[in-house]
Image (tube, grey):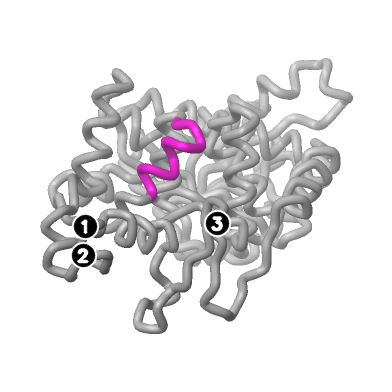
């Protein structure tokens, strides 16, 4: 049930339903509406003619005809009039009504365009904020399992506010460190030479832990067998304990992390499960961990936050500023062309 953000033409989405940003008449138009009618074929218009139109904020459903989607859910977004005439509530209702219809028709996946952000003039950043917050709230409060896709036609379709973009960009500029090809690293004020026999993909902190845990009398690295014997609980076990400590249910946690129930089940049932770094970070955000706690959770999966990764710096920026909304973070990652968290 995660919310995916993808760049695509919505008429090409192979979901159970796609959402059409329609006019009140439901008789076709320009933009997304026109593309969907053209791709679906004339039968779509014929079915729409018998529906009697649709009120703003409501939704109606038809077959998908020549589309890859089984259904088209038509919803009418508000025209932007400055934001003081109930536009936000009516736009929220578009997403809620569409999701309710998808649930009613047993859809397991649905794809949305950015409703009202075209000729209806709703500012793209505000439209996107309404979309992600409304969809995530619906997912958190419904037991129904559905994958939701927010489909942006191109990169220019959405960017975060200029002030936030500039603030994050400044933070990246202040903290970004290019990767070095040599094997020398400075760690907490001490110089350590990393052996050429150690993979450069290995986290430096893990290397240091191996060195510092070596018996002083022998003054040498532990053997691999000794090191494995000393490993404590893995990522899966640590995650489950953290969820309990935070007083959350498992469902609350994986939904806040934008992780599907199926994916979480794999993690929970395999104590040796090794997640992707983006998955581990998503859970750190869901649990609202501090920067230090995030580092500790990442180490359980063999990762670390690094200032040679712009994505890591962006996540760090949000943690430091106390913003643990994964959709806000993903919005920023999207704007900087970085991989998103969750899924």
**Is residue 90 toward the left or the right of residue 247 in the image?**
right
Quarter of the figure that contains the N terminus: top left
Q: Residue 156 lies in magenta, yes or no? A: no
Q: Residue 293 lies in magenta, yes or no? A: yes
The crowd level at tag 3 (other Cα within 10 Å; few <14, some 14-19, many 20+) is: some
Image x and y of residue 276, in percent: 37, 59
Give whichever of 76, 313 is nearer the camera: 313
Q: Residue at x 27, y 50 (%)?
A: 263
Label 3 vs label 2, nearer the camera: 2
Q: Residue at x 49, y 50 (%)?
A: 341
Image x and y of residue 16, in percent: 39, 53
Q: Residue furthest right?
A: 82
Q: Main secondary structure of the magenta part?
A: helix
Image x and y of residue 39, in percent: 59, 66
Q: Which residues are magenta?
A: 289-298
Q: Which residue is mark 1?
A: 215
């Amino acid at each position: 049930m995660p919310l995916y953000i993808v760049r695509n033409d919505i008429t090409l989405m192979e979901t159970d339903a796609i959402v059409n940003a329609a006019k009140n008449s439901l008789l076709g138009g320009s933009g997304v509406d026109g593309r969907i009618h053209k791709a679906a074929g004339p039968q779509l218009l014929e079915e729409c003619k018998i529906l009697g139109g649709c009120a703003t904020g409501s939704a109606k459903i038809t077959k998908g005809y020549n589309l890859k989607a089984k259904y088209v859910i038509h919803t009418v977004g508000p025209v932007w009039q400055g934001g003081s005439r109930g536009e936000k509530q009516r736009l929220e209702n578009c997403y809620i009504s569409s999701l309710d219809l998808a649930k009613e028709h047993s859809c397991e996946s649905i794809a949305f365009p950015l409703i009202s952000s075209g000729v209806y003039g709703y500012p793209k950043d505000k439209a996107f904020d309404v979309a992600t917050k409304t969809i995530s709230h619906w997912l958190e409060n419904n037991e129904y399992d559905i994958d939701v896709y927010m489909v942006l036609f191109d990169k220019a379709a959405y960017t975060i506010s200029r002030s936030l973009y500039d603030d994050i960009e400044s933070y990246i500029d202040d903290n970004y460190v290019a990767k070095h090809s040599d094997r020398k690293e400075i760690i907490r004020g001490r110089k350590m030479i990393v052996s050429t026999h150690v993979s450069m993909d290995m986290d430096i902190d893990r290397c240091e832990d191996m060195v510092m845990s070596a018996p002083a009398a022998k003054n040498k690295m532990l053997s691999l067998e000794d090191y494995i014997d000393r490993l404590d609980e893995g990522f899966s076990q640590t995650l489950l304990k953290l969820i309990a400590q935070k007083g959350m249910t498992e469902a609350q946690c994986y939904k806040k992390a934008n992780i599907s129930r199926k994916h979480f089940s794999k993690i929970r049932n395999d104590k040796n499960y090794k997640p992707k770094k983006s998955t581990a970070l998503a859970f750190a955000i869901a649990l609202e961990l501090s920067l230090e706690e995030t580092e500790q959770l990442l180490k359980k999966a063999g990762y670390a936050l690094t200032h040679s990764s712009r994505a890591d710096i962006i996540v760090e920026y949000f943690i430091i500023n106390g913003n643990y909304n994964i959709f806000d973070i993903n919005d920023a990652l999207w704007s900087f062309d970085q991989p998103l968290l969750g899924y």
